[in-house]
Image (spheres, rainbow, N blue to C red):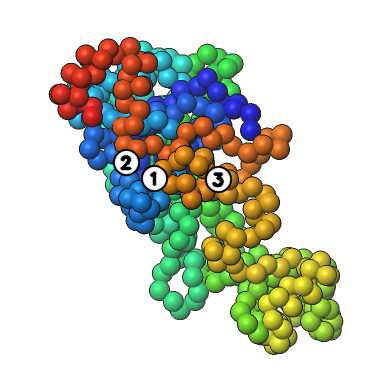
Amino acid sequence: MPAILDGLTVIDLTQNVAGPYCTQLLGDFGATVIKVERPGQGDDGRRFAPLWRGESAVLLAFNRNKKSVCADLDHPRGREIVRRLARDADIFVHSMKPGSCESRGLGYDDLARENPRLIYGSISGFGDFGPLSNLPGYDPLGQAYSGIVSMNGHPGTPPARVVVPIIDMGSGIWLFSGILGAIIERGKTGKGARVRTSLLETGVTWTALMMTSYMATGQVQGPAGSTSPAAAPYEAFRTADGYALVAAGNDRLFAKFCGALGLSHLPDDPRFNSNSARVPNRLELHEILEGETGRRSTAELIEKLHEVGVPVSPINTLDQVFADDHVNQLGMFPAVPPDFRIPEMKFVDIPVSIDGERSVKRLMPPRLGEHTDQVLRAAGYSDAEIAELRALGATA
């Protein structure tokens, strides 16, 4: 993919998932990303399970295309390192609680005085304003507070979060999008900008359809299993040996689905002759349809529905996705260079290409402090100064 952000430098003070995913995206599009980590500890994500040859899958998944530099933000000389790096940077990103960077002299106003072109991005848990702004934020909290957990799972079962970190990764995508917009605006004005997002705001945004439906009807969406509140049949159906998910999202597809099952009379039934009729009668319809899907194997049902053009999918497990020929032909799992310290690892790529090429992969996920000396030398520090900073504990 064209390195469209080549020449831009990012100072990355993020950890865990949300912020690192944003800065990885910036690196995937060609920017130089300098990941600043605590000496001796690094990103908290380095210690999340599972570990692969002693390295966290979280670190490996969200930190390619970055250089790791150690600097102690609680040490005045460590903060000086970050300020010096930020003077010549294009983008600064952090995921600290609101006020934390400001208390260390690393807030937007502090850094923009010396670098007015700086684009300053931040991700917080609950936003920079309001009574909850000082609370820590994690993906499951964002899912719970925004209402997502209340709609996940099946009726009558305990609360369930979406296991995919949709709040963290979504927040990273939103901040990335805002930063791209600020880059475009800076090209017009020459001035930087402050870009903010939060896990809670991302969660509320993901509920847009359900929230608008609530406004329209006054009905609060509860756990829906695999169904959609907007269409039916649009859910998983039991087969003779498992399940298949069918998305017959309009009357034409519903008629084809019924025809494939030998139920051609159903589209004429007043209970099911339109989507608006089918949705409130979903349970009764599901029982009728499943009486027929349950007579066929998953493979047989999928083959038959593909023949008539009804959208359907097996419910794959991750090992099946990883081995899937179609997914691999799309290029979603590119190999790492054979000299990488985990040669059997593959990347999970981003779902976008430009002119047929996928993301830039110039640097493997770094070891803690792997590039400290290299980056500090490039910032103007002499070897003697780097040694002094290391002796003082400002770096490692």
Q: Quadrant of the N terminus?
A: top right
Does the rendering let one see residue 276?
no
User: Where residue 37 sits: x, y (%)?
Assistant: 30, 34
The amino acid sitting under disc 1 is Leu
In front: label 1 or label 3: 3
Is the residue 241 above or below the residue 164 in the image? below
User: Where residue 370 sits: x, y (%)?
Assistant: 34, 32
Most extreme residue toward the left, as rendered? 392
Does the rendering let one see residue 85?
yes
Label 3 with label 2: CB-CB less than 8 Å: no
Quote the CA–CA distance across marks 3 and 2: 25 Å
As helix, strand or loop, the secondary structure at mark 3 comes to: loop
The amino acid sitting under disc 3 is Ala
Nearer-N-terminus badge (2/1): 2
Residue pointed to by mark 3: 335
Q: Quadrant of the C terminus?
A: top left
Left or right of 257? Residue 80 is: left
The label on residue 59 is 1
Is the residue 88 above or below the residue 287 in the image? above
Towards the viewer: 296 or 247: 296
Quote the CA–CA distance across marks 1 and 3: 17 Å
